[in-house]
Every structure is written in structure tokens, then in C-alpha cells.
Amino acid sequence: MPTREVRQHLLRLLREAEDGHVSGAALSRTLGMSRAAIWKQVEVLRSRGYRIEAVPSRGYRLVEEPDLLTEELLRSHLEGCGIGERVVCFDQTDSTNIQALRLVEEGAEEGTVLIADSQQAGKGRLGRAWVSPPGVNLYTSVILRPDIPPWQAPQLTFVAAVALVRAIEQVCGLSARVKWPNDVLVDGAKVAGVLSELLADMDRVRAVILGIGLNVNMTREQLPETLRYPATSLALASGRASWSRLRLACALYRQIDELYRVYLDRGFEPVRLAWEASCDLVGRQVQVASGDDLLAGRCAGIDLDGALLLSGGGATKRVLAGDVRPVD
């Protein structure tokens, strides 16, 4: 077994230990290696920031894991998860979406994830910049290769948005909400966004890249003053100093994996219903700035194209792009 896989299995065994400790003898039997070799791998993990205690007659206990976004750490938390079969990590890059586009052209398999500690050219919707300082947030892209026609590709943006809501609630206990078309809010302020990019032939999708930016531990001073709408971070919203980016990343990938499987098995309807259940604007009067037009009506949810539905005056309008705000 390759050394990296040995460490991944070792970490899984330490995490799953029922009383917190697992003996060297048990690790030796399970991993098929000597106790001296186990000790050597424990020392490697300690050198990488893991706190592992060794107690005579009881064995090893994992006390604390480093909050690092490394391939080894991520893979050790994602065993059995289709999203994260391959992990590509950057200390710094231009944009994880740009790098994902390059990997797609090189044949990267479905489930490949890219994650960066910082970005120099992070992208938001409509060509806007996504501020990406190091050490505080989550910047990631997921490569999917669904066998669907190109017109259905926008549906996957909603898969990512619902997955973000569930991951935030799972790890942080915060009530997150979605805002059409690609934002996630906490307490009415933007905490995350999704930028989907499509590579397709005339009739089939070659790949969809889900680019996700999540403000995790950003301070108020780090939030740009030029933002068009209120923004926050999970730390600011919770009043807590920090949250584990590693835990959030792994929770996000697992939620995407689960929802993507549902999507492939049952279509867009379960995802659409989950998205609408997480949207505070459904059923409310809203305004949508779409190009030079200002549209108004009652938000009736989204259709199979991901278009926003506005009802009023006995008719329903489909809105394909724009910024939506409540008016009641």
C-alpha cells in the first residue's frame, strides 16, 4: 500500500476509535505493518501539524487536526465520496475555475476538485472579481461530466447552492439561505457564490465546472468597501473567531456528491424543490434589475432552466439574468 494511503487509513482509524484511543497492536494488525512503522507514520503526521498523543497501555489518540487544505488531509476525509476522487491543491493560483478548464481539456475525470489557499484572479458572476485573500476562505472548483444536453447545465448551479446551504448548517449550525441565481446568504448578507462554466458540443455536455467561493474567516476589515451588496463571513455571522476550512470543504464535497447522485437518478425536480425551500423570496414581491429593465412581480420560484419566475397581472415571466431584491 502506498505510504500516502497508509496515512489516510491510519487517520481514519484514529478518527473512528470508539473510546478515543486505538492500540498500536490493533493498528499494526489492521494496516499490516510493524508497530515501529506505525510509530514512524505517526511522527510524520505530527510533523505536519497533527496532535496525536500516545498513552501507555491505551495506544494513540487523535487530539487535533491542522486546518490545512492539502491533498492528503482532504482525501483522508473523503473516502468513498465520488467528489474528491482526485484533489488538486494550490497555495496560490489565478483562479481554480481557470485551472479546472485546463484540466478538463487534459481529460480530468469527473469528481476532480481544485482548491486554493488564495486566488489572484477570482471570478464572480457577470465578470465581477471575487476577492480571495490567503488563509481565511474557501476557493474551490468541482469538475462534473454529466450525460445531459447543454440546456440543462445551469441546473447544476442550484445543486452547488443547496449543497452550500447544507454544509454551512451542518458544520456551523447557521441558517443559510439561497438567493437567485447563485448566491448564499446568512442574516441577509452574502457569504458565498457559485460560478458555473460549461464546455459542450452541440448536443451533449463535455463538462460543467462548479466554481465556489465561501467567506469563512474573513474579518470585517478584509471585506472590500466596493461591494454592491452586504457581505459577511461565517466567522462574522456567528461571532466566532474561526471555523475549520477543512471541515467545511469536506462537508461541501459530500453534500455535492449526495445531491449530484439524486440529480442523476431523479432529475432536477428534487433539487429545484430543495432550492425553493431554502429561498426566502419565494412567494414574496420582488424587483429584478435585468439589463436596462426593472421587472417586478411575485417570485414563483424557478423553472427547469433555472430561470426565475415572476407572476403578476395574470401572467408569468421568465427572467434569465439579473439581480433580485424583495420589495415588501
Image (tube, rainbow, N blue to C red):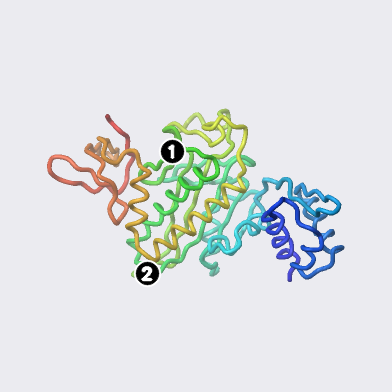
Tag 2 secondary structure:
loop
User: What number is the disc on residue 232?
Assistant: none
Residue 30 quadrant:
bottom right
Position of residue 191 in the picture relative to residue 94 (left or right)? left
Report x, y in % for residue 106: 55, 68
Q: Is residue 44 left or right of residue 224?
A: right
Question: Could you tell me if residue 228 is visible in this image?
Answer: no
| Residue 192 versus residue 240 in the image, above or below | below
In-image side of 273 versus 119 (left or right)? left
Comparing 171 with 135, the one in front is 171
Image point (58%, 46%), residue name:
119
Q: Amino acid at mark 2?
A: Arg
- Residue 104 image point, x, y percent: 52, 65
The answer to which of 315 and 98 lies nearer the viewer is 315
Query: In the image, is residue 74 above or below residue 322?
Result: below
Read off the residue under disc 1: 185
> Would you name the residue on which mark 2 appears?
204
